[in-house]
Image: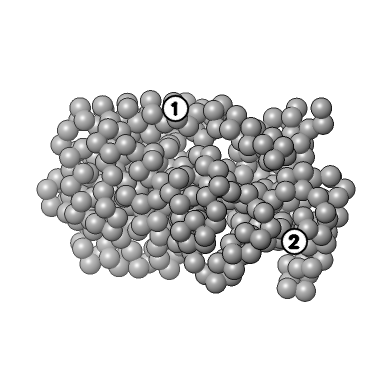
């Protein structure tokens, strides 16, 4: 039997740390070669070539043909030629522009089916993305959403038919667990003040940008520190520098600059997460969070905002707490609840790990993907 030929397509690839990019690289590595012939194309630019990306040998069309507006058609027709040459059956697009390019290329090459991704809950509603989402309905595009919340958002915001969207959630990646949890950093190895190593650490793993709402965490920190003194807040994520400066002004105004620790980005946060006494994600929009899955695998007690698919990962009052978004008081109350109850932290952390490994284990999610690709070919 001939393998199914899949082309994974993304417009730009900035880093391997963000959720979409992590998931793309996971598919490239784990979808079985015996059943699927995989190809990887970056339509425009690979901005930060890292070893974990380059081992998959992407074909970067922008490098070959340039990335100006005038080169756009040249890259499109190059993609059409590749689809014919490789006899592609499925193009899975991982960005809005990649989705548009895939739809046009499939029509021009007269072969293949397009699978788009719905991995957000509509926080970026720029006109060009709305137009692409609207057009896709006329190209019989199928979609994979990584949460039920993302599926419903696609229907609500773009009238994408629910029957064209299949929910396949992100996996707990075995290699990241092995790399991170088998050799975690000890507290004395963390680049934090000595007194912070002796206290409680509230941690959040998220890029420092507005959607992650670090402002609510910082305001919650002020409330927590009025009641508990030996607490530090560790912020792990690549910063958007202008936004970080705004947040630092807020920290200074609240007088808690010594207690907010900016760690920066890291390839595998699981090397740090075991040091968190409480793990937090305060986003005001989120579809499905790899960070929260990793909190769970590391047996951390979790507090998340009630947005998107976070409530699908964290079972409120069972594996963690789900609080209203942009509500520092509610966030602080639940952080304090964990800080004041060591047994509750232990119980919730254990349940979170069991839940994550049972629902989102790699083998189960990979099987769902393989069955989905076969269904696309047969439908």
Q: Is residue 325 visible?
A: yes
Quarter of the image containing the C terminus?
A: top right
Image location (x, y in percent) of residue 31: 66, 33
Can you give x and y, in whole percent of width and height, for residue 132 in the image? 61, 64
Instruction: Name the side, left or right, on which 149 lies relative to 97.
Output: left
User: Would you say residue 20 is visible in this rendering?
Assistant: no
Q: Horizontal placement of 321 versus 308: left or right?
A: left
**Residue at the limit of the structure toward the bottom, as seen here:** 70
| Residue 348: x %, y % from top left | 28, 30
- Above or below residue 287? Residue 297 is above
**Residue sitting at x 21%, y 30%:** 344
Give the camera-side residue of 296 and 235: 296
Q: Quadrant of the N terminus?
A: top right
Image quadrant assignment for residue 218: bottom left
**Can you identify the residue that label 1 sits on?**
357
**Residue 36 versus residue 130 in the image, above or below:** above
Along the polypeptide, which appears first: circle 1 or circle 2? 2
Coloring applied to the structure: one colour
Q: CA distance from mark 1 to mark 2?
A: 39 Å
- As helix, strand or loop, the secondary structure at mark 2 comes to helix
Question: Which residue is identified by label 2?
Answer: 104
User: 86 or 346, which lies in front?
Assistant: 86
Number of other residues with Cα within 10 Å of mark 2, as a class: few under 14, some 14 to 19, many 20 or more:
some
Kind of element beneath mark 1:
helix
Q: Residue at x 83, y 54 (%)?
A: 110
Q: Is residue 112 left or right of residue 25?
A: right
Mark 1 surroundings: few (<14), some (14-19) or many (≥20) residues within 10 A: some
The spot of residue 202 in percent (x, y) is: 28, 44
Q: Nearer the viewer, residue 129 or 302?
A: 129
Q: Residue at x 42, y 31 (%)?
A: 356
Query: Given this view, does label 1 or label 2 mark the residue nearer the observer?
Result: 2
Q: Residue extending furthest left?
A: 227
């Amino acid at each position: 039997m001939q393998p199914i030929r899949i082309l994974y397509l993304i417009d730009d690839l900035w880093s391997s740390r963000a959720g979409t990019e992590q998931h793309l690289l996971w598919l490239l590595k784990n979808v079985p070669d015996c059943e699927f012939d995989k190809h990887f194309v970056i339509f425009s630019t690979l901005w930060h070539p890292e070893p974990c990306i380059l081992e998959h040998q992407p074909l970067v069309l922008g490098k070959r043909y340039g990335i100006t507006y005038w080169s756009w058609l040249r890259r499109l027709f190059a993609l059409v030629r590749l689809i014919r040459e490789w006899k592609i059956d499925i193009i899975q697009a991982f960005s809005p522009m990649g989705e548009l390019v895939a739809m046009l290329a499939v029509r021009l090459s007269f072969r293949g089916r397009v699978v788009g991704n719905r991995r957000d809950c509509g926080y970026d509603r720029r006109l060009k993305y709305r137009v692409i989402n609207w057009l896709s309905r006329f190209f019989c595009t199928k979609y994979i959403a990584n949460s039920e919340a993302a599926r419903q958002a696609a229907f609500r915001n773009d009238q994408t038919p629910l029957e064209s969207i299949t929910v396949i959630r992100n996996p707990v990646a075995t290699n990241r667990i092995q790399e991170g949890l088998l050799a975690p950093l000890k507290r004395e190895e963390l680049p934090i003040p000595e007194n912070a190593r002796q206290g409680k650490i509230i941690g959040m793993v998220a890029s420092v940008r507005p959607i992650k709402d670090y402002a609510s965490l910082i305001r919650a920190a002020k409330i927590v520190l009025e009641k508990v003194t030996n607490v530090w807040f560790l912020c792990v994520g690549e910063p958007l520098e202008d936004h970080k400066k705004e947040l630092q002004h807020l920290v200074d105004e609240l007088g808690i600059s010594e207690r907010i620790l900016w760690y920066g980005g890291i390839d595998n946060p699981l090397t740090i997460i075991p040091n968190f006494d409480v793990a937090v994600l305060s986003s005001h929009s989120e579809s499905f969070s790899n960070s929260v899955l990793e909190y769970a695998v590391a047996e951390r007690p979790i507090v998340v905002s009630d947005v998107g698919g976070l409530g699908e990962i964290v079972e409120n009052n069972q594996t963690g707490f789900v609080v209203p978004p942009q509500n520092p008081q509610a966030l602080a109350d639940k952080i304090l609840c964990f800080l004041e109850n060591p047994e509750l932290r232990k119980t919730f952390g254990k349940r979170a790990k069991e839940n994550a490994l049972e629902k989102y284990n790699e083998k189960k999610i990979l099987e769902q993907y393989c069955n989905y690709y076969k269904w696309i070919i047969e439908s």
